[in-house]
Amino acid sequence: MAKIYKNLINGKYVSSSSGKTYKNLNPANQDDIVGIFPLSEKSDVNKAVVAAKKAYEIWRKVPAPQRGEIIRKATDILISRKEELAKIMTREMGKVLKETRGDVQEAIDTGLYAAGEGRRLFSYTVPSELKNKMAFVFRQPIGVWGVISPWNFPMAIPSWKMFPALLCGNTVVCKPATYTPASAGEFVDALAEAGVPDGVVNIVYGSGGKVGEAIINHPDISGVTFTGSSDVGKRIAEVCGKTLKRCSLELGGKNAEIVMDDADLDLALEGVLWGAFGTTGQRCTATSRLILHQKIHDKFVDMLKKRTEALKIGNGLNEANEVGPCVSEDQRQTVHEYVEIGSKEGARLLCGGEALTKGKYAKGFFYKPTIFIGVTPEMRIAKEEIFGPVLSVIKVKNLTEAIKVLNNTRYGLSSSVYTKNVNSAFRAIEDIQAGITYINAPTIGAECHMPFGGVKDTGNGHREGGWTVYEIFSELKTVYVDYSGALQKAQIDTWD
Ligand code: UN1
C-alpha cells in the first residue's frame, strides 16, 4: 500500500480543499507507487499563509538558541531515519542509493550547522563617531517565506532553505517539486515531530501553476526562495519585483571541466565520470561540458569512452548500479531532443544517444550516458542546460582559450580545472566566471557550510549554504544608543 501524504497546515495533516490527489511514481519502475499526494490549490495556500503569519508572531520571539535546539532534534530524527529516507528518495527521484544517502546527509549537515548558528547569528558592533554612544547591528527575521524546491535534491535543497529560514525566526510555506514530494514531506514531518510550533512549517503539495503561483503572488508572503530553471526564476523575480518581496534564486548551470595537458588524466577521468553522469547529469552543478587541451584530447576521449560504456545503468535501489533513470518521461525526451540537436549541429556522437526501453529498463526512464565530441562553443549543446546524462567535449589549444570557451554561456555556477601547474590553476580561479571553481576535483560536491551559488543567469546574487544563507533570511536592524544625555549631531558635532 502506498503511503498517503497530506498537506501540513497549522500543525494539522489535511487533504487539499478539492480532495484531489495525485500518484508519485518511481521513475525506475512505473509500477511502484511511492505515495499519494494532495493536489492543492490557491485556497490551500491561503490557509497555510494565514497559519504561518499567525505563527510568525510566536516563533520570532523564541530565542534563536531554542529555535536551534528544535532544529537539532529534527536533525537527530533525520540521522536515525537516514537509510529509510534514502530509499524513499531513490524510489521517487531515481538517483542511486549512495547518492540519496548523500542527499539526506547534506540535510543533516545543514541542520547541525543551523542548530549551532542559533548561538551565533553574528552581526556587527562598531564604534560610533560620537562620544557616549554605541552603534550595533543585529539580525531579525523577515516574515513568512515561500519555499519552492526542485526534484533533483529532494531533501538537501528544502533543508538548505528551511533550516536557515526557521533558525532566523521566519515561518515557511513550502511547495516541493511535484516529482519528489515525499522527501520534502518526510523532512517537514521531522520538524513537526521535533516540536516546531503549529503553523511555523507548512507544506502544500501541488503544481507550480497553482500552488507555486499562489505562493509567489500572496501579499502576506514576505520572501520567496526558489531553486530551479532560469526561466521560472525570471518569472518569480518579476512577480516578487512588483511587490518588493525578498527573492533568492538558485538557477541553471552549464558547468565545464577543463583538463590541461599537464593534468593527472586518471584523476580527471574519475572527476568527469562522476560530474557528468552522477545523478544522471541532473544536477545544476553537473559537468555538462568537457574542455580538453588538444595534446591530450584523443587519448582522454578514448579513456572516457571505455569507462562511460561500462557504467552500470539501472534501478538505484540495486547497489551495483551507478546511473539511475531520468526523473520523468518529459525529462528523458528533453535529453533526446538535445541529442538530436547536437547531431544536427554537426557534433559527433561518441557513445550513447539513445533511450533504454527494453527488458529491465522497460518500466523506467533510462537513457544511455551520452558523449558528443567535435563540439564547438557556439553549438546549443555547448551553451544550454540539458539536465541529463549528456556531455559535450570541446577541444582547445591552451588555457586562455579553455577559459574563454568555459565562460561562453549565460550560466555561471560551477567549474573545474585539472592541472598540476599552480599558475594555471590560479589564473583559472581568477578568470573563470562562476560562483564555484574546483581545482583537481569535479564540478559537483559542494559542501553545505560553504557559500553556494552562481553568477550571470544562475541566480540573483545570493549565496545559499554556510554563513551567507543567513543573509538571505534575515533583515539587519541598525541600532544607535546615545547615553550622553545631550543632543549629539552626527556629521556636525565633533569629539571635543
Ligand atoms: C544542485 O544540483 O541543485 O554540489 C545542487 C553538489 C551538491 C548540490 C547540488 N552538493 O553537486
Image: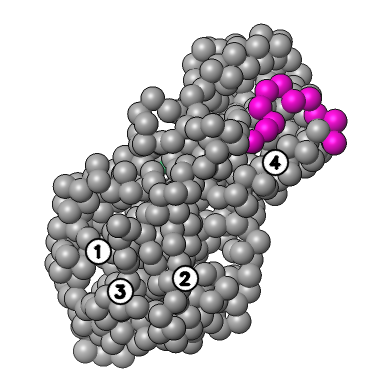
Estimate the x, y position of residue 433 in percent, counting from the top left.
Answer: 63, 42
Q: Quadrant of residue 229?
A: bottom right
**In the image, is 379 to the left or to the right of 177?**
right
Disc assigned to residue 8: 3
Q: Which residue is mark 1?
A: 189
Q: Which range of residues does the magenta coloring cover?
A: 344-355
Q: Is residue 239 magenta?
A: no
Secondary element type, mark 2: loop
Q: Are marks 4 and 1 in contact (CB under 8 Å)?
A: no
Secondary element type, mark 1: helix
Q: Which residue is mark 2?
A: 206
Alpha carbons under labels 4 and 1: distance apart: 37 Å
In front: label 4 or label 1:
4
Cβ of disc 2 within 8 Å of ligand 1?
Answer: no
In front: label 4 or label 3:
4
Location of residue 31 with respect to 127 vertically, above or below: above
Q: Which amino acid does the dot numbered 3 rest on?
A: Leu
**Mark 3 vs 1, N-terminal side:** 3
**Mark 2 vs 1, N-terminal side:** 1
**Mark 2 vs 4, N-terminal side:** 2
Q: Are marks 3 and 1 in contact (CB under 8 Å)?
A: yes
**In the image, is 335 to the left or to the right of 348?**
left
Q: Determine the residue positioned at 31% across, 44% down.
A: 86
Q: Which residue is mark 4?
A: 336
